[in-house]
Amino acid sequence: MSTHADLLETLRGIVGAANVLTEGDLSAWEMDWRKRERGKALAVVRPGNTDEVAQVVKACAAAKVSMVPQGGNTGMVVGSTPDATGEQVVLSLTRMNKIRTMDGGNLTVTVEAGCILQTLQEACEEAGYLFPLSLAAEGSCTIGGNLGTNAGGTQVVRFGNTRELCLGLEVVTAQGEVWNGLTGLRKDNTGYDLRHLFIGSEGTLGVITAAVMKLYPLPAAQLTALCAVPSLDAAVELLGLAHKTLSSGLTGFEVMGQFALSLVVKHFPQQRVPFHETSPYCVVLEHSDNVSESRAREQLERLLEAALEQGCATDAVVAENITQARALWHIRESIPLAQAQEGLNIKHDISIAVSRIPAFVQETDAALAQAFPGARLVNYGHLGDGNLHYNVQAPADTDAEAFLRDQEKPINALVYAAVDRYNGSISAEHGIGSLKRDKLAEHKSPVALALMRDIKKALDPHNLMNPGRVVNL
Amino acid sequence: MSTHADLLETLRGIVGAANVLTEGDLSAWEMDWRKRERGKALAVVRPGNTDEVAQVVKACAAAKVSMVPQGGNTGMVVGSTPDATGEQVVLSLTRMNKIRTMDGGNLTVTVEAGCILQTLQEACEEAGYLFPLSLAAEGSCTIGGNLGTNAGGTQVVRFGNTRELCLGLEVVTAQGEVWNGLTGLRKDNTGYDLRHLFIGSEGTLGVITAAVMKLYPLPAAQLTALCAVPSLDAAVELLGLAHKTLSSGLTGFEVMGQFALSLVVKHFPQQRVPFHETSPYCVVLEHSDNVSESRAREQLERLLEAALEQGCATDAVVAENITQARALWHIRESIPLAQAQEGLNIKHDISIAVSRIPAFVQETDAALAQAFPGARLVNYGHLGDGNLHYNVQAPADTDAEAFLRDQEKPINALVYAAVDRYNGSISAEHGIGSLKRDKLAEHKSPVALALMRDIKKALDPHNLMNPGRVVNL
């Protein structure tokens, strides 16, 4: 144990004693967001700048102590909390929260990993720019965590995932070296793309300490519509029509199944949820325009008229103002909360080629209904990106805990086998962490897994960066 | 030599004798596009499908013979031709040229590596979709080569580089295993992003055999304008205004210096080149709209009026029809040809943060004029992406060959030192190949280079995939 004591002393020397937490309630760092696992850290270390991160990594590496990089700790797959050994250092980046520079002429912002996503969004908007990444945890997640997990959210249909918004990184490697890739270049073909290797690697290859992110001009108008659609086939047809009619003005396209909406109505009766009684699916559709609200409205109405005429929408409402638009989005955002109110449930975060989603859902709905009578399907998500949160709620009036205990594994197996048949992904936007690590080994190509292991061993040969996450060595 | 003979026999068995070329004029495969280097291949092997590629790679690996993957062989940096030893196999992908599937509902096309870019563009357009990658060599380059080098071109300001257009790859690894990543998913967070690692790796980590590429709706209208701008500062100001006014409708933004234009006028006198006598720079600007030509024209005119009023443009013409639009683009496309007509010259393919380009050019122009009196600067390129082809033509009426022999190195050194000071890239879109490999070692961060070497050694431990390109081991 004297090694650990020595290391703690060294760490205190680097970041200051106040930033090496070992006592008191550390659950904010040790417990994962969904409260599935509680770990125990040797210490929570909170460096204040990149040089301190590098020194901390070097010190931990010298002591052969593994590190768990952590941002807002809002991940969904148990990827940023320590294991139960009490021998891992949590490397919390939240003190590194500065927006370093904003470059309007280059349409970029350079930001430290610990900056809260919403803080970044607001600073950009204040400067007259849009930073489009938007997701449920934006009030607490950090941009470093978004990058580490390649977070998705609700604007992906137009702006891509976090990876597509990043032009460069600053990374502390597993050896404690600093790679400064903060050039802000839109084109740079000088060798392997290290940026994309670190993005989405969940802290297993190094620590992202800062990034250059893309900015966009603020839209002049943003309109939201809710459409009743008679089927998922119709929803996909509506999506194609929206791409064609709105082009890059299509900035959001979310689908919600009837049962998902009924849970919102049940648990949040103050919310007005149009069409939920009559329509098997509804779509929240957002249209942004860089010129004017009238131009945006004209184009959106053109889309909805065509959709009603073609029959891929049976009804639609367009928000008349921001309050109404927020209310429509709020329905969508309330689904996970309504699910939680309803009780324990099994979550999936899957993606399939958009065109194949209707067949996938029809087939898998039927298979689940047959194998697990009474199980209730809460199907919703980012249809524009082919990403469904295809969740399963225990049968009504049963012991949900017992249902999950007995049926979570076989239900996962059924759903993921269907995902495999459809050439899809078992983790579209949440990542792997430790929750899905073993599942990954079952569902990913052995060739891809071997490549991943080779990369991990090459960049982190002593397996000290977030070990046990993403790859099985 | 019996090993080589055995290998050739094995290769004939895999791809058929007609597809193992060892005799006759192989210069199309052995000489690089810019005719800078002529190599000698052990054989040019032309597999017809992915399985044959895998078998060829396995056979070469077993014989410890290195491979040079090649597409249309139109690269600019000597990256796809064999060395002079006569011991490398050129792995030509051009027989694998099928468009496998087009999925309108998913907005994707799955295409084999050897498909000519223009063939792909045309097939997509015929099916009602836009595949936006567009560059000078599109009539002969292949999509596999575009991916291997992460090609840029003229639509990057809107659609990104080749990398941003790719959703998945099929790759034969250095071990001859097939990784099938052709899922066509827009979101997939199941581990390290292998796709982006292979894209831009110039065949040094494996062989890209097929890819899923993004499609977009065809625009309803595309308008081209030529603007006279009083300075590069003004050009950057115009770019910002164009981003704001046109948003994603800005699909092209190219800058051309006065001397570059004068070469076009001199060597192609039949071309009409507005403003070249009076304006230090001109900009070709393209605006696409998904609704109508009248809407596009209204918005473009709004932009140009504002630019004239602000003074960031001093004059402008808008093409009235496709013929006129092509003529304006043709001016831009003629610059490299006019340069070649004018004589030998030194090419640079650099990128800098857009906002810093005016200062970079002012400083570097002055330094070059002082150090190399009479040297003529042919400055043009993709300003929308911060990418300049900042070329240097020998002084008029001098021996250009002698100038290049004596001055190419010191001129490169001056320009690249300035690029370093401005945190830029010495290869924005052309890649490294062998031409810039040693330069890379001088200008890239040692930490990044070490990471690249670690990755190369991990994925290609026997250094058989395009050895000597990109990374110095």
Image (cartoon, coloured by chain):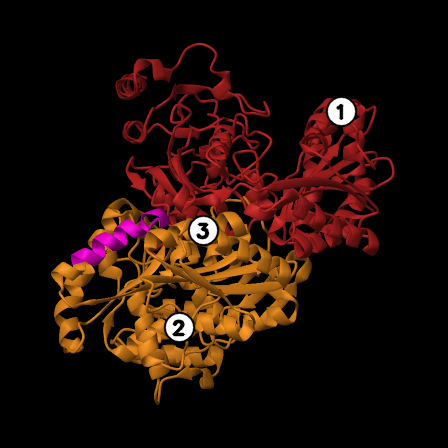
Chain colours: A orange, B red
Mark number for residue B342? 1
User: The residue marked by circle 2 belongs to what chain?
Assistant: A
SS under mark 2? loop
Q: Secondary structure at mark 3?
A: helix
Q: CA distance from mark 2 to mark 1?
A: 69 Å
Neighbour tally class for label 2: few under 14, some 14-19, many 20 plus, Cα within 10 Å: many
Q: Is residue A454 left or right of residue A114?
A: left
Which quadrant of the structure image shows residue B431? top right
Residue B357's spot in the image, x, y percent?
71, 51
Please report whichever mark, 2 or 3, sits nearer to the chain's N-terminal start.
2
Residues at marks 2 and 3, CA–CA distance in whole angstroms: 23 Å
Tell me the residue that label 2 is attached to: A273
Graded by Cα atoms within 10 Å as few (under 14), some (14 to 19) or many (20 or more), the crowding at tag 1 reads some
**Mark 3 or 1, closer to the camera:** 3
Q: Which mark is residue A85?
A: none
Left or right position of B291 against B237 = left
Task: Please state if A245 lies on the left or on the right of B300 as rendered.
Answer: left
**Vertical comparison of A323 with B246: above or below:** below
Q: Residue furthest bottom?
A: A24
**In the image, which residues are magenta?**
A352-367
Q: Residue furthest front?
A: A309
Check disc 2 and give the amino acid type: Val
